[in-house]
Image (tube, rainbow, N blue to C red):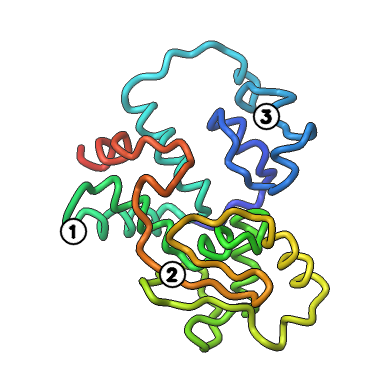
């Protein structure tokens, strides 16, 4: 399956919640979900009763689209989460949080996961002093993420650093916006993720 390249506001409308796929636009009056809250399509406004499978599928799609991962990637993350000790659903969310593109987003250096992915793909960041361009790379406690030296004079990067200065990062990240660095001080816990996920529905879906 190729990555989705259509209008992303349709995805928020389909899931019935803001996925913050367009950054600041999502919290402005231009948000498509605020202007038209029904699902896209000819029958989007119909009042349909969702069955159990439908609820599970929508929760999986919402989570996958929020983090911007493909279907096969998501299944791989679920299988890895299931092999770990503890609650599979919580393991899954915490694993997704540790993706490098999500870390850049949590640092405040990107307005959306898509922008964070592009910045990583264009090799604007380093991990423990080494250049990286893999958005799906999983960080560990103690890892240091920083803007690459040759990218620090970029007008775009400077603007992102200024925005990051007023951004509230999660407690598992120690962000120094002026230095353009962040350290993973601990692994994220489920309570550190403030987005409204119901990961148990995803576990039920894949447990069938």
Q: Position of residue 196 (x, y in %)?
A: 46, 36
Q: Is residue 58 left or right of residue 46?
A: left
**x and y percent of residue 50 in the render?**
41, 19
- Graded by Cα atoms within 10 Å as few (under 14), some (14 to 19) or many (20 or more), the crowding at tag 1 reads few
Of the two numbered discs 1 and 2 on the same chain, state the one appearing first in sequence: 1
Which disc, if any, is residue 33?
A: 3
Image mark for residue 184:
2
Q: Residues within 10 Å of mark 2 (few under 14, many from 20)?
A: many
Residue 83 disc label? 1
Residue density around tag 3, few if under 14, some if 14–19, many if 20 or more, within 10 Å:
many
Q: What number is the disc on residue 192?
A: none
Side (left or right) of 33 relative to 200? right
When the figure is inspected, residue 199 is found, relative to residue 81, above or below; the finding is above
Q: Residue at x 33, y 27 (%)?
A: 53
Q: Earlier in the sequence, mark 3 or mark 2?
A: 3
Label 3, label 2: how far apart the Cα atoms are:
34 Å
Q: Earlier in the sequence, mark 1 or mark 3?
A: 3
Q: Is residue 201 above or below residue 71?
A: above
Q: Nearer the viewer, mark 1 or mark 2?
A: 2
């Amino acid at each position: 399956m190729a990555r989705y390249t259509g209008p992303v506001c349709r995805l928020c409308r389909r899931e019935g919640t803001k996925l913050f796929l367009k950054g600041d636009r999502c919290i402005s009056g231009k948000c498509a979900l605020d202007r038209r809250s029904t699902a896209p399509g000819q029958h989007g406004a119909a009042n349909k009763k969702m069955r159990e499978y439908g609820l599970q599928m929508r929760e999986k799609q919402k989570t996958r689209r929020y983090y911007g991962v493909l279907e096969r990637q998501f299944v791989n993350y679920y299988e890895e989460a299931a092999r770990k000790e503890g609650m599979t659903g919580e393991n899954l969310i915490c694993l997704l949080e540790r993706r490098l593109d999500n870390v850049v987003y949590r640092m405040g250096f990107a307005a959306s996961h898509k922008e964070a992915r592009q910045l990583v793909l264009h090799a604007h960041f380093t991990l423990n002093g080494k250049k990286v361009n893999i958005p799906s790379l999983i960080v560990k406690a103690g890892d240091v993420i920083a803007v690459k030296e040759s990218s620090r004079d970029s007008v775009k990067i400077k603007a992102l650093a200024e925005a990051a200065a007023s951004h509230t990062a999660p407690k598992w990240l120690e962000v120094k916006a002026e230095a353009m660095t962040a350290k993973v001080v601990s692994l994220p816990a489920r309570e550190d993720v403030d987005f409204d996920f119901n990961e148990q529905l995803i576990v039920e879906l894949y447990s069938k």
